[in-house]
Amino acid sequence: MIIGVPKEIKNNENRVAVTPGGVQEFVKHGHTVYVQHTAGNGSGFSDDQYVEAGAQILGSIEEVYAIAEMIVKVKEPIELEYALIRENQLLFTYFHFASYEPLTHAMIKSGSICLAYETVEVNRALPLLVPMSEVAGRMSIQEGAKYLEKPMGGLGILLGGVPGVKPANVIVLGGGVVGTQAAKMAAGMGADVTIMDVNLNRLRQLDDIMPANVKTQFSSEYNIREAIKTADLVIGGVLIPGAKAPKLITKDMLSTMKPGAVIVDVAIDQGGCFETSKPTTHAEPTYVVDGVVHYCVANMPGAVPYTSTLALTNATLPYAIQLANKGWQQACKDNAELRLGLNVVNGKVVYEGVSQAFNLDYTPVSEVLA
């Protein structure tokens, strides 16, 4: 198979979908890999390293899309890429369709096969989302601590406090991968942390493994309303696979929060879990609503590309090799995990969460694999 690795062109996105080590694996299996010039620079991988691993370098993104049977990316295609995508071309990347209707319609129109990292599933876990959720969860505290500083518009609070001065009050919404990593980081920095979830079994697990400065609380609208009144930093880390995130903090709740408090919406890729959230970039990461600082960067791990690229490709490469070796249809027939990654196939929406998000016709994936 001919594999194309374009350079990511989303704002401040420095990750790359395949490392030189990944190229070597593809080549070992008899595949041809084309990498766009400087695609790996942001993650610390030079063109020479890719060539040494067996890749061929192409000068433009147009050339990569034109020659590849399978495009392997990190982030969803942006508007500049829509016209480059061909019928029957396989795209293996993060899509987050349910949060952006124009992308969904563009991919339907393209006739391509869209296999989304974020809906590949095994035993109710999302193995290709986990590594980036781990990065984003940890980063949410790092960024939240920074924007709590007065020059950044925050309250002017040090997350861990100092002897004689209480630490910051951190509320983490969601006890999944993002929430767990965020709580661990905040606790490690000495904050007073409360992690909220609707799953009591998960709260019991967290209560057992978290340090003493992390408390658990059942997540209800009433409890959230009460908790955010005294919060200095709120992390939103809830996820419904393939669907829009629920709005846990509404605009009217912001007026009850401290001016200068910070909220970090890690669920922004799935539409955000705060009503006032809108996607931002690393170039302009924050905005203020009702005195509350909003950090809603849609590709948080892109700020630490070396770590993120290695973490992501460790997880994606085995699946990408299967797709290249067998072709997408046979690979998805053989592997139920990959089959759940199919979202849009030849103009048909085959993932129920996407069809429900925009009231589109749904085609069972079994029909396109028949």
Image (cartoon, rainbow, N blue to C red):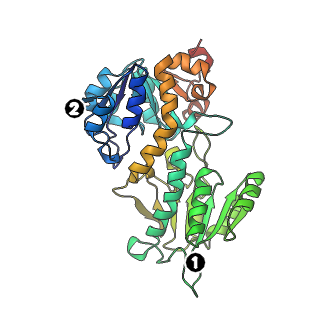
Q: Quadrant of the C terminus?
A: top right
How far across and down, in percent of the image, does residue 169 sit?
Answer: 60, 72
Q: Residue at x 56, y 30 (%)?
A: 341
Q: Quadrant of residue 72?
A: top left
Residue pointed to by mark 2? 59
Is label 2 or label 1 in front? 2
Q: Residue at x 64, y 54 (%)?
A: 174
How far across and down, in percent of the image, does residue 321 sit?
Answer: 48, 26
Q: How many numbered discs sit on the rendered protein?
A: 2
How far across and down, in percent of the image, does residue 109 sit?
Answer: 42, 23
> Could you tell me if residue 298 is visible in this image?
no
Q: How many neighbours does mark 1 have within 10 angstroms: few (below 14), some (14-19), or many (20 or more)?
A: some
Q: CA distance from mark 2 to mark 1?
A: 51 Å
Q: Quadrant of residue 90?
A: top left
Q: Quadrant of residue 340?
A: top right
Q: Quadrant of the N terminus?
A: top left
Whether 28 is drawn above or below 273: the answer is: above
Q: Earlier in the sequence, mark 2 or mark 1?
A: 2
Residue sitting at the far bottom? 164
Whether 309 is drawn above or below 53: the answer is: below
- Tell me the element at label 2: loop
Amino acid beneath label 2: Gly
Mark carried by residue 262: none
> Could you tell me if residue 27 is visible in this image?
yes
Which of 311/268 is in front?
311
Residue pointed to by mark 1? 167
Q: How many neighbours does mark 2 have within 10 angstroms: few (below 14), some (14-19), or many (20 or more)?
A: few
- Tell me the element at label 1: loop
Amino acid beneath label 1: Pro
